[in-house]
Amino acid sequence: ALFGAASALPNENAGDTGLIYANLALHLRPEFPVAQLLVGEVLDVLERYADAIESYRAIPKASPYSWSARLRAASGLAAIERIDESVAILAEMVEERQQRSDAAIALADVLRRNDRYDESVLYYDVAIDRTGAFEARHWSLFYSRGVMLERTKQWPRAEADFLHALELQPDQPLVLNYLGYSWVEQGTNLERAMDLIERAVALRPMDGYIVDSLGWAFYRLGNFETAVKHLERAVELRADDPIITDHLGDIYWKVGRQTEARFQWERSLVLGAEEEAAILIRQKLKDGMPDEPEATQ
């Protein structure tokens, strides 16, 4: 009855009440894996990750709840920056049940979030290889691997993954935006890139990153006045982003608003632009922007 009371509470609202009921259930029946799993879940909601991990680890490996508990423990370890421990658990699980893809996906995600892109690609490969018939929900697998492939400069494979993701989920704004923005950055498929980004903006008009992509596409096409409008809107939506702020500085320079351009570039540095971008920004602050050839369709 106590376990039923605890599990009836939605996890996001369970808080201390759910934790009390679940712990009482464990007090009366210490060897109760499903209650231990529930305690861990409630502790996760409360962001008491170290305590949650201990609850998950108390579940015997022979228990049918062990697999889920180990996945959650690995997630908790990653949340408290114990990355090597998280990776070790998940790598063992990947080898343990070679017909399952969930541990491989979780491991690829942990590696991705910690900038270990090459390793992440390998485990997305495993997860995709272990997935049977692809359904619409599998778009995220191809999108995530595509992002990692793009980051590791494997563009042909990345592009194929983004296109596959769109086959599975044609109106997924993250994929529409990433592929469209990538094409814009490369100066290729610009008309199609514009179509993808405009669809993404229609789906997520309040997403500053996607609005930035549209502004940057207009910039690359030489439509500077329209680009200003969208990039100003993007900065309104994501005032803390150094890349979007840098983009706004660039377009201000192109339309002759040089004082405002320098202000935005300075802001980008203050906001923590990555070193490679910061070098270019400092160069622009020193010398301004060179003329660029017009983009090709």
Image (cartoon, helix red, strand yellow):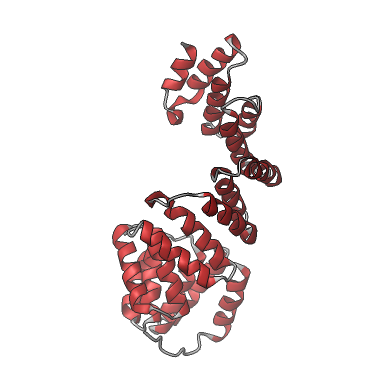
**Residue 266: x percent and y percent?**
53, 71
Q: Number of numbered discs present?
A: 0
1 sits left or right of 203 in the view: right
Q: Nearer the viewer, residue 26 or 42?
A: 26
Q: Nearer the viewer, residue 286 or 245?
A: 245
Q: Is residue 114 above or below residue 276?
A: above
**Residue 205: x percent and y percent?**
31, 59
Quadrant for residue 79, please give it.
top right
Quadrant for residue 60, please give it.
top right
83 sits left or right of 199 in the view: right
**Residue 68: x percent and y percent?**
56, 33
83 sits left or right of 19 in the view: right
Is any atom of residue 222 visible in this view?
A: yes
Quadrant for residue 44, please give it.
top right
Q: In this view, does 75 lie above or below 290?
A: above
Q: Residue at x 46, y 88 (%)?
A: 292
Residue extending furthest toward the left: 202
Q: Which residue is drawn at 41% across and 78% down?
A: 251
Q: Quadrant of the C terminus?
A: bottom left
Q: In this view, does 133 lie above or below 22?
A: below
Q: Residue at x 33, y 60 (%)?
A: 170
Is any atom of residue 235 visible in this view?
A: no
Q: In this view, does 274 lie above or below 291?
A: above
**Residue 216: x percent and y percent?**
40, 74
